[in-house]
């Protein structure tokens, strides 16, 4: 199935399961700039990074603070796996799908021409009752659609939203529902999906602080799990 058809099919998500979702507008699909000082500054950093790399790159990572963390706890793992490649980090702490949509509208991928784009977004949309699973799904699908529109030659690797919280919770359940639907976007040609969340939890369902010290953001060990999980597919996509 062509990427366009796969994405089109995914926009026909099931009807909202509650009245609130049926009547309120879905903010997750409306592009919005960051209004807070830290988020605004970081957004400007990654947009400038895009403007400075117009000759193409191997890999572009797009996401929130977990992606931004490649420059923190994940920096040594980044150097090992991506230091010899031209890889760009477009992670902005605190971003939701609507903020990534705004960045895409404002040049995040313009002229960058990544061979592979790695996307992991949506965990901040899952906070409290801010968004339902259906709304988060629509937001992530909107981001995927915009990446395909603005970088049609890129191979897009969509990652399942990582599990979070020390143990089982409604929030984790919401994330799992989104991931189950996100898996359907893969067409095996231009859009690929990978969920390695099971590698981030223990056998009893708990998350170890050795992997996520605050049960959300990754440690160096967590970034190593991430890099090792996607490396075989990255090698294949970059080769092709």
Image: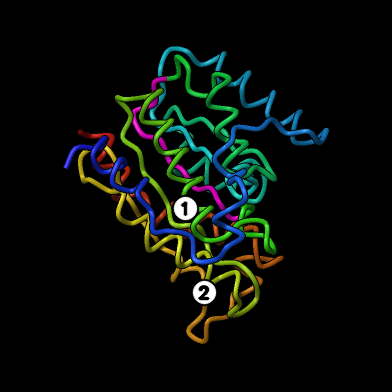
* Rendering coords of residue 58 (x, y %): 38, 28
Instruction: Please identify the residue farthest to the bottom as the structure is shown.
Output: 204
Question: Quick one: quadrant of the C terminus?
Answer: top left
Snapshot quadrant of residue 235? top left
- The residue sitting at 23% across, 39% down in the picture is 5
Mark 2 and mark 1 lie on one chain; the one further toward the N terminus is 1
* Rendering coords of residue 91 (x, y %): 60, 38
For residue 210, above or below residue 240: below
Q: Which residue is mark 2?
A: 201
Which residue occupies the foreground of this view, 55 or 156?
156
- The residue sitting at 60% across, 29% down in the picture is 102
Which residue occupies the foreground of this view, 52 or 13?
13
Disc number placed over residue 170 in the picture, else none:
none
Question: Quick one: quadrant of the N terminus?
Answer: top left
Q: Which residue is mark 1?
A: 137
- The residue sitting at 43% across, 30% down in the picture is 146
Check contact, mark 2 vs mark 1: CB within 8 A.
Answer: no
For residue 213, above or below residue 154: below
Number of other residues with Cα within 10 Å of mark 1, as a class: few under 14, some 14 to 19, many 20 or more: many
120 sits to left or right of 126: left
Q: Secondary structure at mark 1?
A: helix
* Rendering coords of residue 201 (x, y %): 52, 74
Number of other residues with Cα within 10 Å of mark 2, as a class: few under 14, some 14 to 19, many 20 or more: some
Mark 2, mark 1: which one is toward the viewer?
1
Separation of marks 2 and 1 at Cα, in angstroms? 23 Å
* Rendering coords of residue 198 (x, y %): 44, 71
Classified by dominant secondary structure, the portion drawn in magenta counts as: strand
Answer whether residue 75 is visible to the viewer in this image: no
Answer whether residue 182 is visible to the viewer in this image: yes
- The residue sitting at 28% across, 34% down in the picture is 238
Q: Which residues are magenta?
A: 113-123
94 sits to left or right of 1: right
């Amino acid at each position: 199935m062509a990427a366009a058809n796969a994405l089109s099919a995914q926009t026909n998500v099931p009807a909202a399961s509650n009245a609130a979702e049926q009547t309120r507008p879905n903010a997750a699909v409306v592009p919005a700039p960051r209004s807070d000082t830290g988020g605004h500054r970081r957004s400007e950093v990654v947009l400038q990074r895009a403007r400075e790399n117009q000759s193409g790159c191997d890999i572009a990572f797009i996401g929130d603070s977990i992606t931004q963390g490649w420059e923190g706890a994940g920096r040594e793992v980044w150097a090992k796996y991506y230091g010899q490649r031209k890889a760009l980090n477009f992670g902005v702490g605190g971003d939701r799908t609507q903020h990534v949509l705004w960045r895409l509208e404002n040049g995040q991928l313009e002229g960058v021409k990544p061979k592979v784009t790695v996307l992991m977004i949506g965990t901040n949309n899952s906070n409290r009752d801010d968004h339902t699973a259906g709304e988060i799904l629509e937001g992530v699908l909107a981001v995927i659609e915009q990446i395909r529109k603005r970088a049609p030659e890129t191979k897009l690797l969509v990652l399942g939203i990582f599990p979070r919280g020390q143990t089982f919770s409604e929030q984790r359940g919401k994330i799992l529902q989104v991931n189950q639907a996100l898996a359907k976007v893969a067409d095996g040609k231009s859009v690929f999906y990978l969920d390695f969340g099971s590698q981030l939890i223990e056998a009893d369902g708990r998350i170890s602080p050795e992997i996520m010290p605050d049960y959300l953001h990754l440690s160096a060990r967590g970034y190593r799990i991430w890099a090792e999980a996607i490396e075989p597919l990255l090698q294949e996509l970059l080769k092709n």
